[in-house]
Image: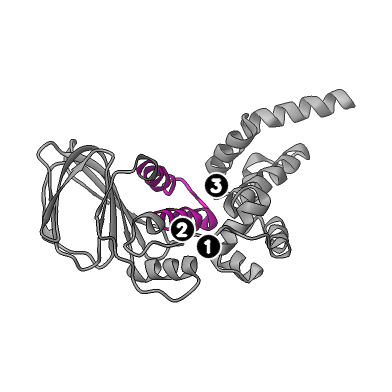
Amino acid sequence: MSKGNRQEDITVWRLDDLKGVELRSGIAVREPYPKHWHEEYQFCFIQAGGGELFYRGVQHDTPATSLFIVHPGEVHSNQTETGCSFRSMYIEPELIRRTVSDVAGRTQSFPFFSNPMVFNAEITRQYQTLHSSLESAATTLERESIVLEMLTQLLARYSQEKLRLKSPGREHAAVERVREYIIEFHSHNLSLAELARVANFSPFHLTRVFAKEVGMPPHAFLTQVRVAKAKKLIRIGVSLSDVAALTGFADQSHFIRHFRRLMKITPGAYLKTARTFYTELQ
């Protein structure tokens, strides 16, 4: 993490279980970036303020709510007169290539984005939401799913050679295997690759088919299972800190956040309700 003065703040972080991805966020950044290049693909969303991107011989305005994409090895520079706040993601080329091959179902070369600028409100809003969620997503499965979904949308809409996303079929037996696997091993830090092996599908195909069959992606189903198991443990008197650990949540705050999101009450409030209910039954 690197920080400047009170007006300017840049944070850089990597997630141990999300290989090939580096995340950055900047607040009120004014200092220009001179000519430089990256080994990775860069995806940068401008949250506030704005500036200019000089890239492949063209000057591009980068206003608030715009997203720009820079290819590995391409020299570019950035400047701003007003300052800007941003969220960037740097993704290693091999991860992008694997994603393309996964989606297309065949070996692909590195994709090219002929227009670096994206102004589509739906896509930029989704990117911002997904980037922000990586700060709080505490499971490998959720993090991998978030990045896969973002890349799939960008590649399908904006790469020079458009990826065609076929409608998922109904591979019921494979989905049931994965569903049962998640229920059995819900306390483990499951990965998308692990579940894909259970189904004998690619990660992309598994995610789409599972969502079609079950009604939600694997990471959301995992959270539902954990909360359901947590309710049972709370009712038999297990402490909330132990419930969080036994059901696979990263920590108690992560447990409370997801429990409240799905149940609309905190685990503590649920505990009081459960105690009252069982007391009245006696």
The residue to which callout 2 is attached is 148
Q: Residue furthest bottom?
A: 107
Looking at the picture, how far across and down is residue 70, in whole percent? 24, 59
Callout 3–callout 1 Cβ contact below 8 Å = no
- Tag of residue 204: 1
Residue segment shown in magenta: 124-153
Q: Earlier in the sequence, mark 2 or mark 3?
A: 2
Looking at the picture, how far across and down is residue 257, in whole percent? 55, 38
Give the crowd class for mark 3: few <14, some 14-19, many >=20 residues within 10 Å. some
Nearer-the-camera pick, 196 or 164: 164
Task: Check disc 1 and give the amino acid type.
Answer: Phe
Instruction: Name the secondary structure under disc 3.
Output: loop
Looking at the picture, how far across and down is residue 52, in whole percent? 14, 46
Q: Is residue 250 in the magenta section?
A: no
Horizontal side of 155 relative to 146 (left or right) equals left
Give the image quarter of residue 42: bottom left
Task: Check disc 2 and give the amino acid type.
Answer: Leu
Tally of numbered tags: 3
Q: Quadrant of the C terminus?
A: top right
Give the crowd class for mark 1: few <14, some 14-19, many >=20 residues within 10 Å. many
Q: CA distance from mark 1 to mark 2?
A: 7 Å
Q: CA distance from mark 3 to mark 1?
A: 28 Å
Horizontal side of 23 relative to 202 (left or right) equals left
Q: Residue at x 63, y 71 (%)?
A: 200
Callout 1–callout 2 Cβ contact below 8 Å = yes
| Camera-side mark, 2 or 3 | 2
Q: Residue at x 14, y 61 (%)?
A: 56
Q: Earlier in the sequence, mark 1 or mark 2?
A: 2
The residue to which callout 3 is attached is 251
Q: Earlier in the sequence, mark 3 or mark 1?
A: 1
Asked whether residue 178 is in view, the answer is yes
